[in-house]
Image (spheres, helix red, strand yellow):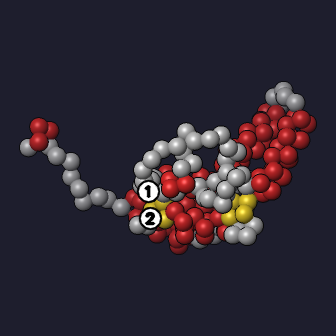
């Protein structure tokens, strides 16, 4: 983001993922590393995220710690194993993202009107976000919704490219 520095919830989840995967690498492959320190840090970050990056009133994780706004990257929370897909906080986040970021059946990454990214203009649907939603639906047990959205994302286009030379 080009705006002010903030603690973005998705970034903090990725910090948790980094410690979690480093610990797994040591445990599974016998690699060296300060595992006990990493466990402490992983648990600190795990406790921090729901405390500072969750809006209990609305029942959703937030884009960053100083807002109630959303970001479609929050859909990766169950995908990386931070919480299970059927956790109420994840389900609430999916619902809120559907309400706030869905545009003509596909997801925007976030609402640009907030100015958080420091860039003027509109945000159009971003395909990666809709694919995250497919995965979040599946993790939440919403298989029919996952299939329907995946079918829309993969539907063939009727447009054809112009021939070389404009012919």
Q: Position of residue 155 (x, y in %)?
A: 36, 61
Q: Quadrant of the N terminus?
A: top right
Indicate whether 5 appears above or below 73.
above
Which element type, helix, strand or loop, lies under badge 1?
Answer: loop
Q: Which residue is mark 2?
A: 103
Figure quadrant of the C terminus: top left
Q: Counting other residues with Cα less than 10 Å from the Cα at mark 1, is it few (<14), some (14-19), or many (20 or more)?
A: some
Q: Which residue is mark 1?
A: 125
Crowdedness of circle 2 by 10 Å Cα count: few (<14), some, many (20+)?
A: few
Q: Nearer the viewer, residue 108 or 154?
A: 108
Horizontal side of 24 relative to 4 (left or right) equals right
Secondary structure beneath disc 2? strand
Among the 4 quarters of the image, the one containing residue 86: bottom right
- Rendered residue at 70%/52% (across/down): 66
Name of the residue lying farthest toward the right: 36
* Residue contact at pointers 2 and 1, CB within 8 angstroms: yes
Q: Report x, y in % for residue 14.
A: 69, 44
Instruction: Report, in whole angstroms, how far the alpha carbon at label 2 lies from the one at label 1.
Output: 7 Å
Asked if residue 117 is positioned above or below residue 83 in the image, the reply reads above
Which residue occupies 89% across, 35% down? 37
Which mark is first along the chain, 1 or 2?
Answer: 2
């Amino acid at each position: 983001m080009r705006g002010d520095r903030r603690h973005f919830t998705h970034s903090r989840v990725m910090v948790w993922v980094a410690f979690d995967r480093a610990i797994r690498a040591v445990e599974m492959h016998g690699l060296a590393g300060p595992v006990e320190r990493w466990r402490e840090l992983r648990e600190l970050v795990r406790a921090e995220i729901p405390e500072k990056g969750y809006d209990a009133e609305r029942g959703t994780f937030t884009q960053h710690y100083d807002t109630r706004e959303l970001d479609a990257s929050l859909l990766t929370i169950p995908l990386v194993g931070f919480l299970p897909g059927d956790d109420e906080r994840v389900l609430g986040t999916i619902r809120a993202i559907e309400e706030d970021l869905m545009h003509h059946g596909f997801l925007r990454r976030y609402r640009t009107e907030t100015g958080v990214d420091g860039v003027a203009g509109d945000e159009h649907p971003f395909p990666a976000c809709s694919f995250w939603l497919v995965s979040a639906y599946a993790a939440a047990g919403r298989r029919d919704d996952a299939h329907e959205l995946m079918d829309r994302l993969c539907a063939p286009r009727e447009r054809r490219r112009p021939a070389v030379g404009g012919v």
